[in-house]
Image (cartoon, rainbow, N blue to C red):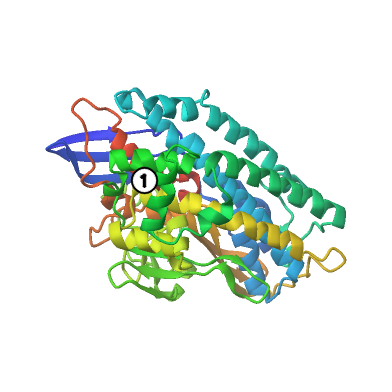
Amino acid sequence: MTRLIVGPFNRVEGDLEVQLELAEGRVASARVNAPMYRGFEQMLVGREPHDALVIVPRICGICSVSQSVAAARAIADAAGVELPPNGVHVTNLMLACENLADHVSHFYLFFMPDFARPVYAARAWFGEAQRRFAPLAGEHARAALAARQRWFEIMGTLGGKWPHTQSIQPGGSARAVEAAERLRLLAKVREFRAFLEATTFGAPLEEVAALDSEAALARWHAADPLRGDLRFFLTLADDLQLATLGRGPGLALSYGAYRQPDGSHALAGGVWNEATRTLAGVDLDAIREDATHAWLAGDTPLHPREGHTEPRIDKPGGYTWNKAPRLAGRVVETGAIARQLASGHPLIRDAVLSQGTNVRNRVLARLLEVARVLPMMEAWLAALAPREAFFQPDHLPADGEGVGLTEAARGALGHWLRVQRGRIANYQIVAPTSWNFSPRDAAGTPGALEAALVGAPVLQGEDTPVAVQHVVRSFDPCMVCTVH
């Protein structure tokens, strides 16, 4: 048995280290280490509840709006305040702006550059991969970076700045949108649509979103295998058999994305069970965080509402700062693929039923989500009523509890808040990468990524195994959120 430590990973938000045990040229077991401690949950205790709106966005510089939305919803839940429709739409627009930017950044800047590495020089598609995706030089990567920069001007209009905007409030948006601004925002959305349709998909967004099966996707791909970067990705995914890498745990969790004024979600939530091919509701009471193998006090799994965060750097058996979230004792995967499964998209359900959640299907689901959500943004902009309210004041009781749930780019994000005598008595966060990159629990069950790495090939002498990197990056880790 050979041991190999891979890390720190580049092109990852935050610090990440993966410890591998190898046998016969493949990963036999893995341990995922989040080696940085930050302590945001402790910072919040004793503060006025609305201070969370200033503090928690600073957990992360790339998904700060998601943290803002979760915090605002936790306070709103405790206060019993309802958002006016305009507040709902503006919140969704900001969240979608950030999430779609994350998806595009992940594809062009984090995931695809690995295929421009010399290890693939013998592949027929290598030259094209270099032309499109080589770090700092790839034509499409540079175009995506420029499009992303212009795209974030939406956030400047809606929130004043990004990251760490303060316009998201428990009662809606502190920034009203005027009629003329709505037209300028729509122009920005249409500009990003043009980039996606010309470069990423080589097809209208609606055409991509309408693909309803693996057979339909195969026909669409075969019609022009190099047109658009999604088709090109499918070409190399088939060649490298990426669908055989990084098998997920079989349960996929989504809280539901983009809440609507009537209380529903544009992308419905739920827990998709791959084995039974069924969708169940999310039982929040079944969530527990297990700190057995974390450098944190506590050996009994606790619900987030009772959770605590106390460092124990010398704890026997600890190997990460990440707790191990479980749903009714089971490991789950979260992210864009979970959202597409829960919301019933036929292509992703067909892909997962035939091959499971894997490297290829995670990337496919992420790009499909871009094609689905951008037209929703156009509809939300059209639904804004500039002369009506964007905000409803909230009045927190001196004692109370609240839960704030949302979907960040990387998956299910939850904030649990308890207020006593007008101050935060406890604040617990379970981030998407907490679910996906969790350590082993008390039963010794590995987390989603730890299990997904088993079986990945490692070539002799390979210090940074490319297959391992593909699996890790397919989950799009955000380690600073994990070690909040």
Position of 94 with respect to 473 (left or right) is right
Using the rendered image of the protein, determine whether residue 48 is visible from the camera's viewpoint: no
Using the rendered image of the protein, determine whether residue 190 is visible from the camera's viewpoint: yes
Q: Position of residue 41 (x, y in %)?
A: 53, 55
Q: Which residue is mark 1?
A: 313
Q: Is residue 470 above or below residue 216?
A: above
Q: Position of residue 279 (x, y in %)?
A: 40, 73
Q: Is residue 455 above or below residue 461?
A: below
Report the number of discs. Answer: 1
Q: Quadrant of the N terminus?
A: top left
Position of 122 with respect to 431 (left or right) is left
- 138 or 80: nearer the viewer: 138
Tell me the residue at 61%/47% (across/down).
58
Tell me the residue at 84%/69% (across/down).
388
Position of 6 with respect to 373 (left or right) is left
Q: Position of residue 33 (x, y in %)?
A: 35, 43
Tell me the residue at 32%/50% (across/down).
449
- 143 or 357: nearer the viewer: 143
Q: Secondary structure at mark 1?
A: loop
Residue positioned most to the front: 223
Residue type at mark 1? Ile
